[in-house]
């Protein structure tokens, strides 16, 4: 919630309480994914960037796919118009969300050279930057596992210092992950995004 809304809730709790109750009741029979997807459209219509970022992340966490978001935007064309849809697309591109990368949209990704094979010991984890993207690379006895460095909660870029042993904790809201499996082990339930990877010609490559 914005600072302005927080102020109004404190200054006029009687009026604002009715407002939030109305919003809750109005969407009571909608599943969370649909409710948040509708909120995405309303934020695009109002061209509220902060709200778009907030509700887009919520919709994705509730199981909405990138193609469903794009379909909803295009279906709302009669109300939104092309200019607002392009405005929203610019923000979505700038957010650099994994769901809107090639794999999430069902497109063919591009392979990127991450590091030399053998640059890490078995059991070691390193945070590396590759072609403008932050990655956590963990090596097991059998393979490399390459994860996006952004927390799936609000896409916070997690630093190397957040890694303690095999536990990676996002500094913003303390979602924690097992770096070996990528699973979320505290606060949330969404795992780290794992990118496809392979060793070829003595180099570790990852695809996104």
Image (cartoon, rainbow, N blue to C red):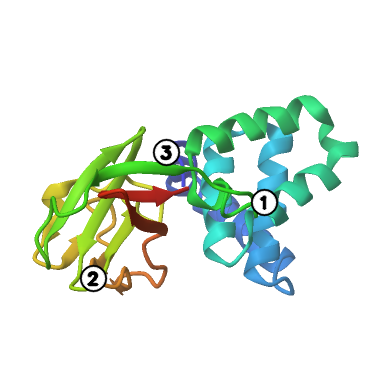
Q: Quadrant of residue 85?
A: top right
Q: Position of residue 43 (x, y in %)?
A: 66, 41
Query: Does residue 146 appear to the left or right of 101 in the view shown?
Result: left
Asked whether, in this view, residue 115 is left or right of residue 183, the answer is left
Q: Earlier in the sequence, mark 1 or mark 2?
A: 1
Image quarter of residue 31: bottom right
The residue depicted at 53 percent of the width and 42 percent of the height is 53
Relative to 3, is 139 above or below? below
* Residue sitting at the far right: 78
Pick the front one: 97 or 140: 140
For discs 2 and 3, the disc positioned in front in the rendered view: 2
Q: Secondary structure at mark 1?
A: helix
Res 180 label: 2
Categorize mark 1 by other alpha carbons within 10 Å: few (<14), some (14-19), many (20+). some
Q: Residue furthest front?
A: 201
Residue 111 in the image, given as x and y percentages of width and height? 44, 45
Q: Which residue corresponds to mark 1?
A: 39
| For discs 3 and 1, the disc positioned in front in the rendered view | 1
Q: What residue is pinned by disc 3?
A: 3
Q: Residues within 10 Å of mark 2 (few under 14, many from 20)?
A: many
Quote the CA–CA distance across marks 1 and 2.
35 Å
Q: CA distance from mark 3 to mark 1?
A: 19 Å
As helix, strand or loop, the secondary structure at mark 3 comes to helix
Nearest the eye: 135 or 73 = 135
**Front disc: 1 or 2:** 2
Of the image marks 2 and 3, the number of the one nearer the N terminus:
3
At label 3, counting other C-alpha atoms closer than 10 Å, the crowd grade (few under 14, some 14-19, many 20 or more) is few
Element type where label 2 sits in the image: loop
């Amino acid at each position: 919630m914005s600072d302005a809304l927080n102020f109004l809730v404190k200054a006029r709790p009687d009026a604002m309480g009715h407002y939030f109750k109305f919003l809750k009741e109005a969407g009571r029979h909608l599943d969370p994914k649909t409710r948040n997807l509708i909120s995405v459209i309303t934020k695009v219509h109002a061209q509220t960037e902060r709200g778009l970022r907030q509700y887009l992340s919520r919709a994705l966490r509730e199981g909405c796919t990138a193609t469903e978001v794009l379909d909803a935007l295009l279906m709302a064309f009669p109300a939104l118009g092309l200019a607002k849809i392009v405005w929203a697309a610019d923000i979505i591109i700038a957010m650099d969300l994994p769901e809107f990368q090639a794999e999430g949209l069902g497109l063919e990704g591009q392979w990127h050279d991450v590091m030399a094979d053998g640059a890490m010991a078995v059991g070691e984890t390193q945070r590396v930057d590759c072609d403008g993207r932050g990655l956590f690379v963990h090596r097991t006895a059998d393979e490399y596992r390459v994860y996006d460095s952004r927390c799936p909660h609000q896409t916070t870029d997690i630093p190397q210092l957040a890694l303690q042993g095999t536990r990676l904790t996002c500094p913003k809201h303390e979602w924690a992950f097992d770096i070996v499996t990528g699973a979320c082990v505290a606060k949330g339930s969404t795992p780290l995004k794992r990118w496809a990877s392979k060793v070829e010609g003595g180099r570790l490559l990852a695809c996104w």
